[in-house]
Image: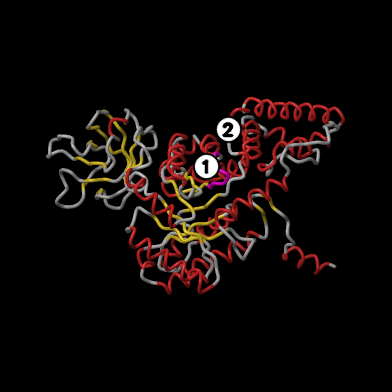
Amino acid sequence: MKDALVHLRAAVERLYQNLIAAEQGAEKIIAGVHPKQQQSATNLIHYLALRCEDLRALQDELHVAGLSSLASSESHILRQVKAVLRRLGANFPKKNKAITYEAGTKLLHRRARALFGHKKNQVIPHLMVTFDEGMASDYAAVKSLLKAGMNIARINCAHDSPGEWKKMIANVHKAVGATGHPCKIYMDLAGPKIRTTLPGKGKEEGRLKLLEQEQFYLVEADAAFDKKEKVLGCTLPGVVKDLRAGDRVLFDDGLFEAVVEIPGERIATLRMVRISAKKPRIKPEKGINFPDTELTVGCLTDFDKSVLPFAQKHANLLGFSFVRSVADVAELQELIGKDNAKKLPLILKIETFEAVQNLPALLLQGMAEPVFGVMIARGDLAVEIGFERLSEIQEEILWLCEAAHVPVIWATQVLDTLNKSGIATRSEVTDAVRAAQAECVMLNKGKYLLTVLATLQDILHRSGGHHVKKRYVFRPLQIAERFLSTIN
């Protein structure tokens, strides 16, 4: 047993040295973030260094020895490694700059409160509700949502107009005054609209019929093409030239999957390889995703820039849609920091494969500001990375954000069937439980929002009593108490 512990200590000491070396190698990066973010940047670097290794065997050995396996230590990883080493006989100076579990937890809670405001129920996440155009004229509905538990009102700038947004915001302020319940205003920049158009065959019928293995073309708006051929256009200029042979192109939330066969500057030849829709027809205004393509077009559009003054005047939070790179974040940070204007906290929406790959760098760029957040936008993200990988990837995003002490919004299709039909599916109730790991949960617009708010709070309250983030806290189980009372 003694030899096993000596071996274990050597393995953990090597791990500790790797974390310290990573911190030293990232000194310039850590020094470049906002002073209030430096502890978090350091912890994120430590966590990234830890996750570069396969720790499964070491975790088993630590567990057998009755020690922490380092799981669930995202917020304070170096401190946890040191604690394990102390149990194995190592000595460290009393002064310890590594962030503690308590300090990391408080930091995350403080940032969530700064972003999302005060909430009455501390057990469950903040609740964000997406407004539809009806909220501009229906004050009673807005007031009811506030009384039902809404903490943040979400306005999607891809829809409606500044006049309607202003009415929605006025209704929120009026309802806050009447109820005494605080509510933040969150505005989502629309981002680049990548949608289908029908420039040729099928335009008159309003749909283009395609079959599996059939060849068709994706064209720029000003491209010249044979009107007899099957052609789809794209609302975002400059996309076609970025396509490479073999790249996948997905249409209508992934119901149609095509592959690029012949790339081109203005016209690309595609082949349809999968159709999962009931009817093999693509209509205008359906979404297009390019999961394999590194797009060179900017994700901050002229329309987004025109919306910024309105958002800076009326909103509390600003959502950045389809962010892909550090340069994207830096550009928006610079724009909202100009002319001493109100500096809105940013929410980085992770909804592309490129954003997932760049997440550590995006988090560190976000740390140029004292507080920011991340939204797991699971709709487009699932299409981009594949539905089968969504569970894995959303877990990884949660881990990295906790290591960076960044508040997370869990978004898209939460209790969606209940919201649309009034009856929940079993699987979406299970999915809603996982939302308790985030600091905020976003609901889409729907007919049964009040029912969804009540149901979600019940689900989150029950699950929130069992764990904090993904650390199970072992509250008393009635099933255990009931059994033991029968035998005692």
Viewer-proximal residue, 440 or 11?
A: 440
Residue 427 lies in magenta, yes or no?
A: no
Residue 108 higher or lower than 18, as above or below:
below
Q: Quadrant location of residue 138?
A: bottom left
- 412 horizontally vs 398: left or right: left
Q: Position of residue 314 (x, y in %)?
A: 43, 57
Residues tagged 2 and 1 counted as in contact (Cβ below 8 A): no
- Residue at the spot 33% in from the left edge and 38% down from the top edge: 249
Residue 122 higher or lower than 50, as above or below:
below
In front of the other: label 2 or label 1? Answer: 2
Cα–Cα span, label 2 and label 1: 28 Å
Amino acid type, label 2: Gly
Residue 172 higher or lower than 55, as above or below:
below
Residue 370 lies in magenta, yes or no?
A: yes
Quadrant containing the N terminus is: top right
Quadrant containing the C terminus is: bottom right
Marked residue nearer the N-terminal end (2 or 1): 2
Say which residue label 2 marks: 32
Could you tell me which secondary element the residue under label 2 belongs to? helix
**Which residues are the magenta region?**
368-373
Viewer-proximal residue, 424 or 292?
A: 292
